[in-house]
Image (cartoon, helix red, strand yellow):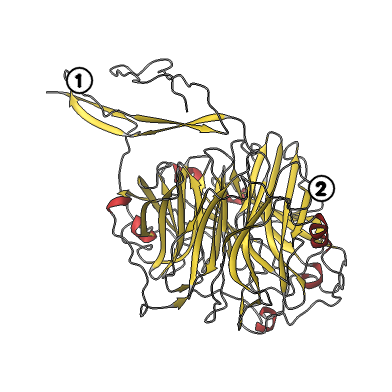
């Protein structure tokens, strides 16, 4: 008897062959020239990988083995922060030739503005709970993003990265903790080693989970089939750069997943189009000229957020900050420093056409990265100990957020700066804008140094994570401590500003998420990064994760908050199950399982929503709604 297989949004599960017999392609970089704007252009990919073969696995996370919690007696280890060059450079003994005696004028502007106002909605977190706990690994590298009704947090675990899935509705755990390496089976990524990065690809409504492996140079990348990380098909890729890709940071862009790494200033482009299709995918490398006096260098890529796509053909963008006094000795400008952009235009079909353009300088107010580092990486003082914490002074903090509002594009980010004696630190934040498309330049729209009025004693703020919501409001989360009375152990706080507020200052009151309870005495590693994202469901709710000091060891925190004045009233629709497959005789009607549809209110929407099948169902299908209209 012949059968007709009826499929509704079915997911096919398959496994492709692993490995590749192809060697990496060494491409002649070709020419370097100066364009009409006076900017250097490097033509041709420096290096092209062989195709990485995809492996697909369907997993119901709720059936996976739970990673056991660390307990006293379990191993403790440190993930090295790789450093290139003279140790004296690491210790910042090569101080500026002409140090600038004046203070940070932007911090003075923030102090003059005052302590900020108490915005009840923004300064009252919606979710504020502990994330994953101490794992025996330094640092934890907390990373997390939000989408599809879920928040996914990952940290460094004893056997590689671990992750937990939370419900955004109330912050409860939906599944986990699990090992990231368990999303696949065998192969080069069978043993993970951490440095996780979690991103929700808002252009494709899919999850991107990454870490590197414990052997070789593998970047292990896991891409979900849909927006539900609990039950989905994962496609795993093992990308192998020519050397170890330390501190990899990713960005979502229409033409590629871009990656910066502490690897001789490497920038990479992964073939996103092939990856989304589940096909073999290559990646290309371009090197960026290094800065002097820094042995740890990584350029983060701008990562897409929102609903308005970048202009057609827009290249990926990487950023770094340049302290003129330190990084260009002898050419000191006592008033200005700069942010440098590098644009990566990748051609996966013809790597010889790939270009890297930059540095493109954007002038900013003077900042100071010349922290005094007596040994290791530590600079930030803590109460009750001589152990100093790592400020990550070298890089713009991950993630760098891109968001477009019609023809106006924005990039927001932050980095640490030294503002006083005893390595007192603050956070420099910035917003770049471009209006009118690719023919026009990026310019500085505003910047600030967050050091509010009213600190009872010199206070340190560092390890920032920032984002912009769909109304142009900005939030900034960070570490905060105070080594002198009244002391404060390493804690977590956040602050924000609305789009129409006074430029260059954070205008809300500083909000404490959790207070630290002890000092970290065994290691100087801290962070190495936190993360802030915005829920694409409403475009308004910020989600933040970071590290603080618990009673005896580090811990992590997860929080969400939003401005009341964000977004236009609308509604959201989610449904389950969205994938069903049945094979039945042609003459026998088969009932599919009911699809439960949930209608949510966004920004106060309360108008009834009517449901229907529009132009109708496909031939052979029938259905009806049991309730319509629905009031969110």
Tell me the quarter of the image containing the N terminus: top left
Q: Is residue 474 above or below residue 313?
A: below
Q: Earlier in the sequence, mark 2 or mark 1?
A: 2
Q: Is residue 338 left or right of residue 471?
A: right
Residue 28 in sight in this render:
no
Find residue 435 and report its horizontal and vertical position in percent: 76, 38
Displayed quadrant of residue 395: bottom right
Q: Is residue 191 above or below residue 632?
A: below
Give residue 56's position: percent from left, percent from top.
34, 49
SS under mark 1? loop
* Number of numbered markers: 2
Give the Cα distance between marks 2 and 1. 68 Å
Residue farthest to the left?
Answer: 1
* 61, above or below 107, in the image: above
Q: Nearer the viewer, residue 95 or 125?
A: 125
Q: Residue at x 67, y 74 (%)?
A: 486
Neighbour tally class for label 1: few under 14, some 14-19, many 20 plus, Cα within 10 Å: few
Q: Nearer the viewer, residue 516 or 469?
A: 516
Q: Which mark's residue is nearer the viewer, 2 or 1?
A: 1
Q: Is residue 82 visible?
A: yes
Disc 2 on helix, strand or loop?
loop
Instruction: Give the residue at mark 2.
Output: 36
Residue 589 is labelled as 1
| Left or right placement of residue 320 versus residue 270 in this view | right
Direction from residue 552 to residue 441 in the image, left or right? right
Q: Residues within 10 Å of mark 2 (few under 14, many from 20)?
A: few
In percent of width and height, residue 95 lies at: 78, 79
Q: Position of residue 70 (x, y in %)?
A: 37, 71
* Cβ–Cβ under 8 Å for marks 2 and 1: no
Disc ID at residue 569: none
């Amino acid at each position: 008897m012949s059968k007709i297989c009826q499929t509704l949004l079915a997911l096919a599960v398959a496994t492709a062959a692993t490995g590749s017999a192809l060697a990496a392609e060494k491409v002649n970089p070709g020419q370097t020239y100066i364009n009409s704007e006076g900017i250097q252009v490097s033509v041709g990919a420096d290096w092209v990988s062989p195709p990485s073969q995809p492996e697909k696995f369907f997993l119901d996370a709720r059936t996976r083995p739970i990673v056991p919690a660390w307990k006293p007696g379990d191993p403790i280890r440190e993930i090295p922060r790789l450093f290139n060059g003279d140790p004296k450079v690491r210790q910042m003994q090569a101080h500026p030739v002409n140090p600038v005696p004046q203070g940070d004028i932007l911090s003075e502007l923030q102090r003059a503005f005052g302590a900020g106002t108490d915005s009840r909605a923004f300064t009252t977190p919606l979710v504020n709970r502990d994330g994953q706990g101490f794992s025996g690994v330094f640092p934890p590298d907390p990373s997390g993003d939000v989408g599809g009704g879920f928040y996914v947090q990952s940290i460094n675990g004893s056997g590689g990265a671990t992750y937990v899935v939370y419900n955004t509705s109330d912050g409860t755990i939906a599944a986990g903790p699990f090992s990231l390496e368990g999303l696949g089976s065998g192969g080069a990524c069978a043993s993970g080693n951490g440095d996780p990065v979690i991103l929700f690809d808002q252009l494709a409504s899919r999850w991107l989970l990454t870490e590197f492996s414990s052997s070789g140079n593998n970047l292990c990348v896991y891409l979900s089939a849909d927006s539900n990380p609990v039950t989905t098909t994962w496609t795993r890729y093992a990308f192998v750069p020519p050397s170890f890709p330390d501190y990899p940071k990713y960005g979502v862009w229409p033409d590629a997943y871009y990656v910066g790494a502490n690897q001789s200033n490497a920038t990479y482009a992964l073939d996103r189009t092939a990856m989304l299709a589940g096909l073999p995918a290559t990646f290309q490398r371009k090197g960026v000229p290094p800065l002097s006096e820094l042995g740890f260098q990584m350029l983060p890529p701008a990562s897409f957020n929102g609903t308005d796509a970048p202009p057609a053909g827009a290249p990926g963008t990487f950023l770094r900050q340049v302290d003129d006094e330190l990084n260009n000795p002898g050419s000191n400008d006592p008033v200005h420093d700069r942010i440098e952009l590098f644009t990566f235009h990748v051609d996966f079909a013809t790597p010889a056409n790939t270009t890297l353009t930059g540095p493109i300088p954007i002038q900013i107010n003077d900042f100071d990265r010349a922290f005094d580092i007596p040994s290791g990486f530590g600079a930030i003082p803590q109460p009750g100990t001589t152990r100093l914490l790592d400020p990550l002074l070298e890089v713009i903090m991950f993630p760098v957020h891109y968001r477009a509002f019609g023809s106006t594009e924005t990039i927001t980010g932050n980095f640490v700066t030294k503002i006083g004696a005893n390595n007192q630190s603050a956070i420099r934040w910035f917003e770049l804008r471009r209006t009118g498309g690719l023919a026009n330049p990026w310019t500085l729209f505003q910047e600030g140094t967050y050091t509010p009025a009213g600190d009872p004693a010199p206070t340190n703020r560092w390890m920032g994570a920032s984002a912009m919501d769909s109304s142009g409001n900005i939030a900034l989360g960070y570490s905060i401590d105070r080594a002198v009375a009244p002391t404060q152990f390493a804690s977590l706080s956040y602050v924000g500003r609305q789009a129409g507020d006074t430029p260059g200052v954070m205008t809300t009151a500083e909000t404490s998420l959790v207070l630290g309870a002890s000092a970290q005495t065994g290691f100087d590693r801290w962070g190495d990064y936190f993360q802030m994202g915005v829920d694409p469901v409403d475009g308004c709710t910020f989600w933040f994760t970071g590290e603080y000091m618990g009673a005896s060891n580090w811990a992590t925190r997860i929080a969400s908050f939003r401005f009341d004045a964000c977004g236009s009233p609308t509604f959201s629709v989610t449904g389950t199950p969205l994938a069903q497959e049945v094979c039945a005789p042609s003459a026998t009607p088969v009932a599919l399982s009911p699809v439960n549809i949930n209608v949510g209110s966004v920004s106060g929407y309360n108008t009834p929503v009517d449901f229907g099948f529009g132009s109708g169902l496909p031939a052979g299908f029938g259905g009806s709604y049991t309730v319509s209209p629905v009031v969110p």
